[in-house]
Amino acid sequence: MTAIIGISAAQLTEQVPNTISRNGTYVGGDYVSVIAKSGAAPFVIPVTDTRLVTTFVDQIDGLILSGGQDVSPALYGATSQTKLGAICPTRDLFELALLKEALLQKKADSGDLPWCAVA
């Protein structure tokens, strides 16, 4: 049986002058290629309603939290620093719920993840 590896997606919102905004969900191509080359099937998990987290985790055998924006310091009781990059609180809360469920179902290892102190 082929393992299914979930990859958390990032969100992209772009306001284009004189048009409606464009929204997108994406993962870096390297995540997809490396998983496929390993013989597993990549499964992109979009940032959406946290009530769907259990459904997503039920479908996967492992989880990768993809890189991207910085984690909001508010989630681990800190304040913003001057070198803080772009944050996406919606993604942060979704990935935290995703990680907690994956750990509960024993489909993730907290290892050196940025969420270790929070989860």
Image (cartoon, helix red, strand yellow):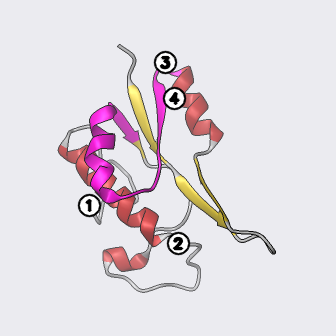
* Residue under pointer 2: 87
Q: Residue 23, image x and y in percent?
A: 62, 60
Q: Check the image and report above or below for 73 versus 5.
A: below
Between marks 2 and 1 in the image, the one whose residue lies nearer the viewer: 2
Mark 3 or mark 2, which has the lower sequence index?
3
Report, in whole angstroms, how far the alpha carbon at label 4 lies from the one at label 3.
7 Å
The label on residue 39 is 3
Q: Check the image and report above or below for 23 versus 29.
A: below
Q: Residue at x 41, y 32 (%)?
A: 5
The label on residue 119 is 1
Q: Residue at x 50, y 21 (%)?
A: 38
The label on residue 35 is 4
Q: Residue 98, image x and y in percent?
A: 32, 52
SS for callout 2: loop
- Which residue type carries mark 1? Ala
Q: Is residue 73 left or right of residue 118?
A: right
Report, in whole angstroms, how far the alpha carbon at label 3 lies from the one at label 2.
33 Å
The magenta region covers 38-63
SS for callout 3: loop
Mark 1 or mark 4, which has the lower sequence index?
4
Residue found at the very far top of the displayed protein? 1
Report, in whole angstroms, how far the alpha carbon at label 4 lies from the one at label 2.
26 Å
